[in-house]
Amino acid sequence: MSADPLQVLASAGKGKNTRGLLRVIILALIVAAATASRLFSVIRFESIIHEFDPWFNFRATKYLVANGFYNFWDWFDDRTWHPLGRVTGGTLYPGLMVTSGVIYHALRALTIPVDIRNVCVLLAPGFSGLTAIAAYLLTNEMTPSPSAGLLAALFMGIAPGYISRSVAGSYDNEAIAIFLLVFTFYLWIKALKQGSMLWGALCALFYGYMVASWGGYAFITCLLPLHSFVLVCMGRYSTRLYVSYTTWYALGTLASMQIPFVGFLPVKTSEHMPALGIFGFLQLLAFLDYVRSAIPSRQFQTFLWIFAGAAFGLGLLGLVVATSAGFVAPWSGRFYSLFDTGYAKIHIPIIASVSEHQPTAWPAFFFDLNMLIWLFPVGVYLCFQQLADEHVFIVVYALFGSYFAGVMVRLMLTLTPVVCVAAAIAVSALLDTYLSTKSPDPEENQAVEGAEGKKGAKSGLKATNKPMVGVYATWGKGVVVSALAVYLLLFVLHCTWVTSNAYSSPSVVLASRLPDGSQHIIDDYREAYQWLRQNTREDAKIMSWWDYGYQIGGMADRPTLVDNNTWNNTHIATVGKAMSSSEEVSYPIMRQHEVDYVLVVFGGLLGYSGDDINKFLWMVRIAEGIWPDEVSERAFFTPRGEYRVDGEATETMKNSLMYKMSYYNYNNLFPAGQAVDRMRGARLPDVGPTLSTLEEAFTSENWIIRIYKVKDLDNLGRDHSSAAAFERGNKKKKVTKKRGPRVLRLD
Amino acid sequence: MRSLFSLFLFLFAAVATAISASGNRLLAILDNVAEKENYSKFFGDLESRGFQISVEAPKSESLALFHLGERSYDHIIFFPTKAKGLGPNLTPNLLVDFMNAQGNILIALSSDLPTPNSLVSLLAELDIQLPADRTGLVVDHFHYDASSAPDKHDVLLLAPPSALRPDVKDFFGTGAGPDDAIAFPRGVGAVLGSSELLTPVLRAPRTAYSYNPKEQAEAVDDLFAAGEQLSLVSAFQARNSARFTLVGSAEMLQDKWFDAEVSKAAAGEKKMAKTFNREFAKRVSGWTFNEIGVLRVNWIEHHLDEAGATNESNPNIYRIKNDVKYTISLSEYAWTAWNPFTLPGDDALQLEFSMLSPFHRLPLALDAAHSSDSASAYSASLKLPDQHGIFNFAVNYKRPFLSNLEEKNTVSVRHMAHNEWPRSFVISGAWPWIAGLGVTVAGWLAFCALWMYSAPVGGKRETKKTQ
């Protein structure tokens, strides 16, 4: 073995087994990179559950681990939505919790003592590794090039669009759902390609898992029928399609109906009707196909197509009739808002109020996908060139996904996999072309051309006439390849930067920089929740805006009135009304709901933008939706149409409970007359608001969280304002000569 | 467990001697100790009932209502004082705090002496109005004592009060004879606001009125109040059951009126009768200082009332449509001992099962099985509503002169668990579907068998075709 090492290395890549080994090693490295890049949040902060929804998932997981699966299944949660309670076991997607429960118990069985919190925190990074593998498998189905799959795995592993929902601690449904989404698609393509019942059944199985995990399963439910429909329209109906689709639909629907939250929705709601319709349509086609093969006749064929069209039309008509008659529920509001972005704002403020339901701003595409976004159309174009069944899938998915990603920020997540796959196809096509050092032999080629010249003289494109035209020089290839390499490196840099800076903040803990550059942690949320946990009765009911419901339930372990599971709009509107009305109106509402403490988030001192005064208009709007006579959004704007909190604020604003709670005692922090709200840059009036039905119980270090205790009814039967006036030492005015008739007492 | 509990209660009741249900430290505010002599019988009665009386002058330095945040006294009684101010230890805020800490107050007024500012403020907070200082004297030209005030008509003779309403217990006038009269000498009448916590104990007769004795005008242009609107003795019970009584005439508590012989003017004859004052004073002070009309909840118990179920006491969670039994045990304190509480004739004790609003409002019936000598149990059975949520068993019984009962027991009502529904084969409507299921399975198996075991008939033709 005297060959130089370079040659050894080169020849090592040539054997089939070594290539397989290399591929496995590369894939393993990608998985490791995907997992590792999501650990920024743990390193920067700590192993903590992030944001809002994950806190509920974490709490539910703890319940599952503590009480077992059947109790979890039948869980009635009496610590949320007081006093309605929530049938939690039947209104959640249990996939995530069950997955971490299984992992937890498996590790325990292996005598590895883990904390359930760490399982939850690290679940998303772990599953993102699996997603990378799934993307690899899916891409391998699209193109014979082996590099495409690895590139897709790499892109999937580090694309910020996916990382945004899967950093360590982001314990949300999406954490496992994206893996399931991609893997289900892979199995679908596999089933479709082979016409295999086995793969179809596997696809249905993973579809069932997906349904158990995330509400976004409807994306699969709509995409697979659409793909099939497009194939049929292209005249590509085949028994493969028939077998794979019917297997998936029948088994998948059965599987999905096992989830209590989904129940009979697959046969009742409009979102699921396309799948059912295509299922029926395929049956008809199969029947006609059989008939056609039995009786060959041209006229009959045309008749068949008319028949098929009529049946499809009739089915559609039947669906419309069934919908209008009420057998099938019409499209839900969330779906309308997918087609008309203004719909939610007018009709369902509760949906519009969620920031992740807003339409996507265009820089977000570049921010989340970087160079993939311009490689994506190339990949789709390459798919068009081949246009086998699976490429049609990519095209359909690309169209569908792009539209929805444009409508809603959070649906960027469903677009990311197809972008990664398409971009990987494009990059690998480029690399495959330009990395090959072989250049065609001109003479040989001419001979070929000469032989084929006469035959192909009439074909249209020049390039096909002269396959010799192209970049074959080594330096040209080198430039292209190195440019691509630079882009790829920049992509990695961008992804790392975005991950570490934008997506790794737990949002429970805020970080800021001190003038000297060191990190300063603002921990008001946990401070306040800890205060609640230690200083209030265990069943003290906390009223707050619904954003904080899950966190209060998870961190403070106290019952809440409303939380992020916004299942009851009226209840949320009740809280909105209590917040936006005057004390006299709010107090009876709070009494009726047995509220003990009210929690508000106030960013005025720190300049924290996500506070309740900024969200206040949503509370007003949601309350106005239910009580248009009692709450009016207009009354919170000055006559000139401004939303102000300073001295010019409207009387309704100044009297609202939210305003009073936010600014109560705030003046005392400043020298007289210089109280400033740093968030809104407003100078506050000299005299701060007074509260008579509430008393301040706790204010956190940076005033971000303020907690008020609701007073009991006055012991002596006075109203609260006069009782408070008496406390302050104001004597009751003597009732001298009453005007008007005497009020006599009857008893 | 319940029997153990009642045993404990019995022991507790035995230990508690003949004193108030809430303590026996009584503070009397008097100008000087000498004045105490005028009320010696009244005080003697109180002492014989077990009260420890400390007498203090209003501005005394040693006077403090609270010591280290705890009440120093359980009850206060104010007699008229000459001073207009009561000093820094008896400010209205302190008195309100005293009531918020479940202390009881009795105030006796006089038309000759000014009412201290502090008390006027306190009364204003309680929604009681007094005439301006020394300007209100209640007179009645039809119901006066002919022997002591034949000219001034300012000693009223009143019949002992009867029950306020048919559903309210009569604490103050029971047992009085038809000739018994309460003498109300030279007193002040108050006007009660519309607060539901206020109740008049003794109202002026229809013919009485309040006037300013210094003003000698022929016609009264601004009448303070007249007739039954004038409350001579008024009771107030705060939400925490702290009691407050305003007696318009301190003189009626003095020894001379306890045994005085009076003659009713309206009777026309000079028939002398002994006053009812001593008994009335005992009852008024006894009510104020928690000796009568005090209710106590001994225990509350609710359990699943279904055959075959484990009837655990006071579970935290029920299921919708469960049958549940609720029992509450009540005692009433009367002078010396806890007795079973019996409802007045027309009244009903009600149980609410509520979430935001009541889903059930049921009368609680006397449950003799769980009653004892010192407690009576009331119970009701109900079927929980078909609505899950967090519900309260609520008993809210607030009547004049009885201490307030407001009991809330929170339970969760859960939905049906997945295995609590009837099985499909129990439901007759499901039989066609189950049959369909069976037929499909059988048909599929039969078809497979047929398919697998039926050899193709024309083997030759088949091969031809493939070729």
Image (tube, coloured by chain):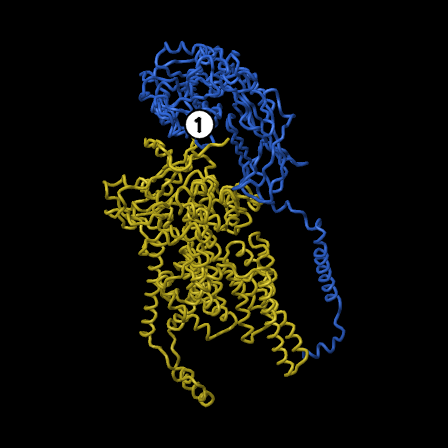
Chain colours: A yellow, B blue
Residue B179 image offset from top left, x and y in percent: 55, 16
Secondary element type, mark 1: loop
Mark 1 nearby-residue class (10 Å; few <14, some 14–19, many ≥20): many
Whether residue B243 is visible: no
- The amino acid beneath tag 1 is Ala
User: Which residue sits furthest bottom?
Assistant: A454
Total residue callouts: 1
Residue B391 lies, with reference to residue B96, above or below; the image says below
Whether residue B449 is visible: yes
Q: Pointer 1: what residue?
A: B226
Figure quadrant of residue B63: top left
Relative to the observer, which residue lies in front, A292 or A618? A618
Residue A538 lies, with reference to residue B92, above or below; the image says below
Task: Give the chain of mark 1.
Answer: B
Image side of residue B395 versus residue A681, left or right: right
Query: Which residue is located at x 70 percent, y 50 percent?
Result: B427
Residue B266 image offset from top left, x and y in percent: 51, 18
Relative to the observer, which residue lies in front, A115 or A681? A681
Residue A721 image offset from top left, x and y in percent: 37, 37
